[in-house]
Image (cartoon, rainbow, N blue to C red):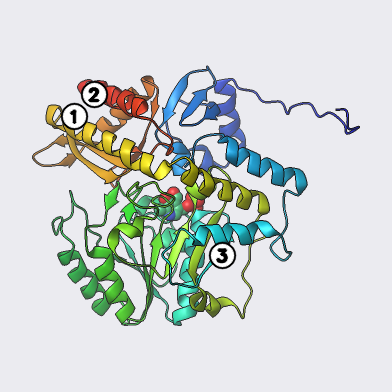
Amino acid sequence: MDDGSPAYAPLALDWDTEAVAERRRRFLSPALATFIGYDDPVVWQRGSGQYVWDNHGRRHLDCMAQNVCISVGHAHPGVLAAAREQMEQLPHVTTAYHHPQPGHFAEELIATLPEGQDWVAHFVNSGAEAVDLAVLIARAHTQSFELLALRDAYHGMHYGAQTATGIGQARQLVPPAPGYVQVMGPHPYRGPFGPDAQPYLEELERVLHTNTCGAVAGFIAEPIQGYGGIVELPEGYLRGAAEQVRAAGGLLIVDEVQTGFARTGSHFWGFEAHDVVPDVIVMSKGIGNGFPIAAVVTRREVAEGMAARMFFNTYGSNPTCCAAGRAVLRAIADEGLQANAAHVGGLILDGLRTLQTAYPRLGDVRGRGLLIGAEIVADPATRRADAAGAERVQLALLARGVVAGLCGREHNVVKINPPLCVTTEDAAGLLRAMDEALAAL
Ligand SMILES: Cc1ncc(COP(=O)(O)O)c(C=O)c1O
């Protein structure tokens, strides 16, 4: 280097697949080492836009966007430039000091939310942290304790978030965090009360009267359940739930970790499709395009419930992550990514519905924008879930250069949520791969 600073050699990396898998087994906690997307290890080496390349140089369309984190594209040049500039100046300023990035980011984030509210943002590091903070805020504000959450919801793995999560496998063998009450959630395809909102609202009312003291801190829900199987709340449910919960003194907390940041295409935020303004909004994943940041946004008067006490994270408001987040917002706006999510997502949904006519074991196709689920069943008449079949489809897609996930209570829903910059050509390639994968079932 000509500025006199020492040259640093790149850190050594062993890219051999077996070596990567072995180090993971050997040195990472078993809880992490066994959380894998594919039984046969796949090693990702580089990414650009909607694609990732493995360590053999093979390109894949990343329809999982690294667990919905890559919103505007892998290695997005605008995000990298913003983060690099901040890192070169000062990578971290802890929450107790002043720096302009968090304030700018909060201002720009709040500009995406419905007007007429005095919104404020609280930055943390991950979705589960944000969920736990949102619940704490609701409890501090309402001075009530009980928190309603939906079955099959996924809200993260921390102690409280884990209990809000209505997926048994996400629970550890310890007593759950106190105060969480699970409610039967609507499901358009599998719901025991049918596809419409009303019977589930009646169930919510029953739960409020039988399983709570009648005064609650809030109700948390994803507008479209992500890991629960891409289950969109039916029209009127979120608004009706908000009315009931507010009448019981509680707040509506919306978890936008998967649905936010224009992914649903029709709207910037998932809740906007439901004609209701939440009291508390949880954001993560796509907010940072791969940089670890999350946020809870609420009204000032609600957040004030916690102001007399201390709550901060050392890395919350980290300026590098905030710079990345600002660049994400800029990219969504400048590159028309919300409209693209609506357009390309619509093509994928239409194409999958066409495939359904040829392949009845594609039992249901659902979602919005670029948050899509394709449910594989053993028998369309009984709708019996076929997890093994879904896994075969997932592997057939991988063999054709498409990364997809599996979700749903029965693990039989193929999850498709690529970065928002995915193109119509990518959609056509994905549908071809899906056609072949289903034919092979
Ligand atoms: C809807 C939703 N909420 C919360 C979380 C938790 O986020 P994190 O894994 O960053 O803690 C997730 C993670 O997948 C999620 O999908």
What's the distance in space between the residues labelled 2 and 3, CA to CA? 44 Å
Rendered-image quadrant of the C terminus: top left
What's the distance in space between the residues labelled 3 and 1, CA to CA? 44 Å
Residue at mark 1: C-beta within 8 A of ligand 1: no
**Which of the labelled discs sits on residue 327, or is there none?**
none
Residue 9 can be seen in this image: yes
Residue contact between numbered discs 3 and 1, judged by CB atoms under 8 Å:
no
- Placement of 96 over or under 386, stated as above or below: below
Is 132 positioned to the left or the right of 199 in the image? right
3 or 1: tag closer to the N-terminus: 3
* Residue 247 percent coordinates (x, y): 30, 81
Q: Label 2 sits on what residue type?
A: Asp
- Placement of 311 over or under 2, stated as above or below: below
* Residue 69 percent coordinates (x, y): 48, 43
Q: Label 1 sits on what residue type?
A: Leu
> Residue 106's quadrant in the figure?
bottom right
* Residue 362 percent coordinates (x, y): 19, 34
Mark 1, Cα crowd under 10 Å, few <14 / some 14-19 / many 20+, is some
Residue contact between numbered discs 1 and 2, judged by CB atoms under 8 Å:
yes
Residue 159 can be seen in this image: no
> Residue 50's quadrant in the figure?
top left
Q: Label 3 sits on what residue type?
A: His
What residue sits right under mark 1 in the picture? Answer: 355
**Residue furthest front in the image:** 334
**Residue in the foreground of this view, choosing between 332 and 64:** 332
What residue sits right under mark 2 in the picture? Answer: 435
**Residue in the foreground of this view, choosing between 365 and 23:** 365
Is 102 positioned to the left or the right of 32 in the image? right
**Which of the labelled discs sits on residue 122, or is there none?**
3
What's the distance in space between the residues labelled 1 and 2, CA to CA? 7 Å
